[in-house]
Amino acid sequence: MKRVLIVDDAATVRLYHREILEAAHFAVEEAMNGIEGLEKALQSPFDLYLVDINMPKLDGYGFLRELRGQDLPQAPAIMISTEAESNDEQRAYVAGANLYLVKPVKPDRLLTQVRLLLGDTHP
Amino acid sequence: MNPLLEQFLSEARDGLQDIGEKLMQLENAPADAGLMNELFRLVHTLKGNSGLFDFPEMTRVLHAGEDLMDAVRNGQAAYSRKLADRLLDAMDFIGMLCDEIEADGVTGAAHASVSVHLVKGLRQLMARDEVAGIAERHLAAGITDDTSAIPAAETAASLAASLAADLPLATIPEPARLEAYRRASAGEPLHWLLYTPSEQCFYQGDDPFFLARQTPELLWGGIEARTPWPPLADLDAYCCVLDIHLLSAAPRILLEEQYRYVADQMTLTPVSRFALVLPQGDANGGPVYDDFVSDARNLLAAGDLAGLARNAGTMLELSSPDLWIASALRWLRLVLETEPENRVVLDALVDSLSSLNAPDWTAVLAGWVEPRATHPADPPPGHDHRPLTAAPIESIHEDRPRVDESQVSGDDGVRSVLPILTTAEAEALAAILASQREILALTDTPTWLPGRLKAAAAVLSACLRVSGATDARPALERATATALAENTGAALLAWLDGQFSSSTSSDTRAKEEASTAPVAIAADPPQPWPQPEAESEVKFGRRAEDAIAGPKSLKVDQAKIDRLMNLIGEMVVAKNALPYLAGRAETVFGVRELSRDIKGHHAVINRIAEEMQDAIMQVRMMPVSFVFQRFPRLVRDISRKLGKEVNLVLEGEDTEADKNIIEALGDPLMHIVRNSLDHGIESPEIRRAAGKPAAGTLLLRAAQESDRVVIQIRDDGKGIDPETIKRKAYAKGLIDEATLERISDQEAVNLVFAAGFSTAEQVSDLSGRGVGMDVVRTAVEKVNGTVALTSERGRGTHLSLSVPLSMAVTNVMIVVSDGQLFGVPMDSVVETVRVPRAAIRTIKRSLATVLRGRIVPLKSINALLGLAAPPRSNADDELAVLVVRLGDESVGLLVDDFRETLDIILKPMTGVLSGIPAYAGSALMGDGSVLMVLNVREIL
Amino acid sequence: MAIEYKKNLAVFHDVVSVEEAEALLEWLQTKRTAKVDLTDCVHLHPANLQVLMAAKPAIQAWPTDAGLSAWLESALVAR
């Protein structure tokens, strides 16, 4: 089972993404901010990261920079933003994101992207 | 409710609470960038969450709030009190929507106009250029905040509506109706508004009349009593029984805005201007009109409107203005002036002059179409903007890659199914590749560049896999190694261009076209999805352990806790049966050993039950902050309304008490705080004149003192004048002249707690009619609490509420009288004494005795309860006296005997018994009998 | 005081607030032939208005504020 870490401070958004991913048989874990996300990733790296931008303590950019700076197997990361931040796509890539999606991401679209990033078109 | 929505509501509520608190904090530290960021983040999160659902009004308002806070934190807009006000209003609105969603699962469409109003208010606060930028974005997103109201079309339908509503339009004086008609014919909408304020509205500080007078585009307004007036002696001036109705030429949206806080008390009916054409007056007398009517018809037929107007003017001069005909002529003249082209209406008016009946507009206008361009009536603004809905999760699997049956060869061949990309997948793949291209083309060299390159390489490897080109993997690995060695993405970018530039766009498209001829995996063995399974399983095992540290708190339904509470109550009662059983074992069956064993087990069970009880109490404990948290906002709103400056200081918010106690404190505290703001703390000018700081201080402090929670409310306002209180109390007949003379200042101040104490000085629109303090006392006493008040004139007032930590278990003393057992709460018991009959005196037909130099009045409990038996003495002719406290005084209750004290679960009296105030409740005893617990205060 | 009581006449000044209503009611309860002068009144809380509507004292003078006067006439002039 592929493991996905959702890093988002909004519990509702975490639950939304978790439901989508779990229905497609991913093992999902959650982190409420960048620091917590980093701690979880360091404990055991994930196959994919779903990262919010605006979070307390350590935001999405900071999280990605730290993650990419670690000596870990580097897994794909999707940065999920809202339209208010839509000019920040490049900033996301600089920090280490591999894909930039705008909220709310429709379930089927999210799953397609996640599967492709994991090299997997089948459930 | 689905869990996602539930989660959303719960998070939204927390978020709203936090936003409120942060705004309060910002008031004191308006330049705090950290707070500002935090506030932005909270609004931002809330908006992001709401976007997952289809709540357009909510998202719209939150969006505006987010933009505003973004502008503020970036210095493009200034933080101000006005901003805080509007944001708080907006958050109140969101909270209301949450309530609605919780109740109905949806938000009513009726909120569109309120949301638009709120959005407008928020956007106004942003700097000009910022607004322009955002407006552009919104235009692109299909959001319109257009509030420019479009006048309602005047059609036969709206006429029918206003006629059907049976509005008392005839009560509007003619000049007002003429004016209304004039403006409606110029395109303004007309609305009849009925405002029925709630009976309690005066206590909430409302002035419905003022609100009505401020109605935009008011043409006429009237006030009526809802019911016939009672005799003056029975009139309650503060129970609002007025209906307000009015006619306005404002668009619906503005009226809804004006009355948005009382929207449930207001109804709007569109009014056709024709419904106002009601000639009134004396139908008899005046000149003969037949000639006029026939002339008028001829003039109309000839199109000589000026002539008709002239004739009408002449007729008016000849007629007494009070005549019906004069009134009809005035209408005719108005229509001639405002819409001379409207022949249908003019004809109808002339006809009515001959029939002396008001025109029947429904018939006249049937099938008639308004000549002016018609507009759709009040379109709901911005309704085309629908955020993406959270689709049901079940539907996710629809977009599966199609599996070509012909490629599945036998049972073991399933895994050799080749990857085929659906259209959606091909598009997504192209997007992913484009992103990686952008990433690799970045020329910066941050410390984390190797990680970034590795991640991009991992994505590219995945892309190879899905496009079935795994034979290219070695080349990718080489390019990755080179890129890492050179610390630049160039090598990978070159590989990417070589591998995909020709293929991505053209190749995948080719694949789509020939989807029946999938690309085969050429080199690699057809393995299932390449990750080695064993490794991932090992990892997973370890992770499962990591994940054990679950959430540290649980949300539990209150009903479950209540059930536990009831069960432990029964347990305590059941346990109390054991000593009784032990007694029987010994006395009835004569097995002393068994009796001892039972007693031993009782001790064990007793200990466990007590601990269990304690544990359950702990679960029910809530911090005082639950009631305190509403005060910052309340104090802020009220003090500003009163034009006062108040610093609210909260202390000891973490102090805990039983949920019921905490909840019972809400109303009394609210009342006290309002009183302080209203009557205690003076206006800044008066304070300065008295040499005090302009801003008053209101302190709310909670602390635990042994088994009670003490809440203090202290203000540095003007205090209470004992002289005024004394005079009022005397005037109200609460004290007699003698008392007036000798009463101490402290005693006088305490008179505010007396029922029926109400002074005109205490009346205000905020705290009502001074009904406050006796209500406060009653509410606090209901949970076995006490209130104490001290006040120093000119220096302030200090109230102290003391309540028990928990009200679930009551410690009672059992007494016997006339062969019955009664419980008396230990709270009120001072001591138990045995008094020789000789030491009891009769003073003025009342019994009394002297205890430690003080005279204690004695009452026989039998007499108080209506039992005929006299008190019984013991062998030494002593009477048992239970001394109880009653306020500051002690009273001795004559009983037959004392028994043990006992912890009981007090059940309030129910049914017909609930009306008997002499008993506080009942409790089940160990032997199954029922113990009645006395309400000492009531029987004395 | 926003209401000035003179023998049988109550004179309203400026804004008559909610606090006045109780006293006004008490005063009207004792006066059978009360009269009210509203000339200088610019607003009155509806609690006071209710009292006037129920007690029906003679209105000696209407407010000079035309808007207020129109409202009050609707409430206080018997139809």
Image: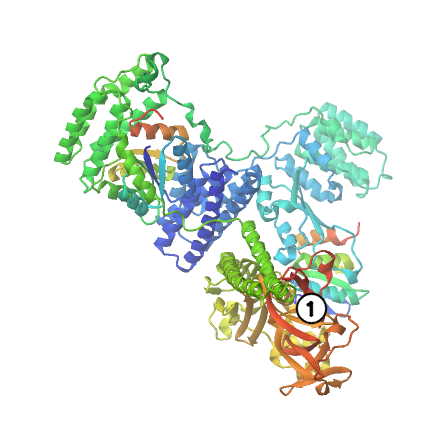
Horizontal side of residue B846 vs C15, given as left or right: right
Residue at 78% in and 34% down: B358
Of A6 and B228, the residue lying toward us: A6
Horizontal side of residue B500 vs B857, given as left or right: left
Provide the chain ID for the residue under circle 1.
B
Picture coordinates of residue B553, whole percent (x, y): 43, 51
Classify mark 1: residues with Cα within 10 Å, few (<14), some (14-19) or many (20+).
some
Q: Is residue C62 visible?
A: no
Task: Say above or below: C5 vs B164.
Answer: below
Q: Is residue B450 visible?
A: yes
- Disc 1 designates what residue? B821
Please, what is the three-letter code of the amino acid marked with disc 1?
A: Leu
Task: Say above or below: B121 vs B905.
Answer: above
Q: Secondary structure at mark 1?
A: strand
Of B298 and B635, the residue lying toward us: B635
- Picture quadrant where residue B587 is located: bottom right
Q: Residue furthest front?
A: B590
Total numbered labels? 1
Of C13 and B908, the residue lying toward us: B908
- Picture quadrant where residue B305 is located: top right
Picture coordinates of residue B411, whole percent (x, y): 34, 16
Q: How is the image coloured?
A: rainbow
Residue at 79% in and 37% down: B315
Horizontal side of residue B135 vs B372, given as left or right: left
- Say which quadrant the C terminus of chain B sits in: bottom right
Of B812 and B785, the residue lying toward us: B812
Picture coordinates of residue B439, whole percent (x, y): 23, 33
Picture coordinates of residue B853, whole percent (x, y): 63, 88
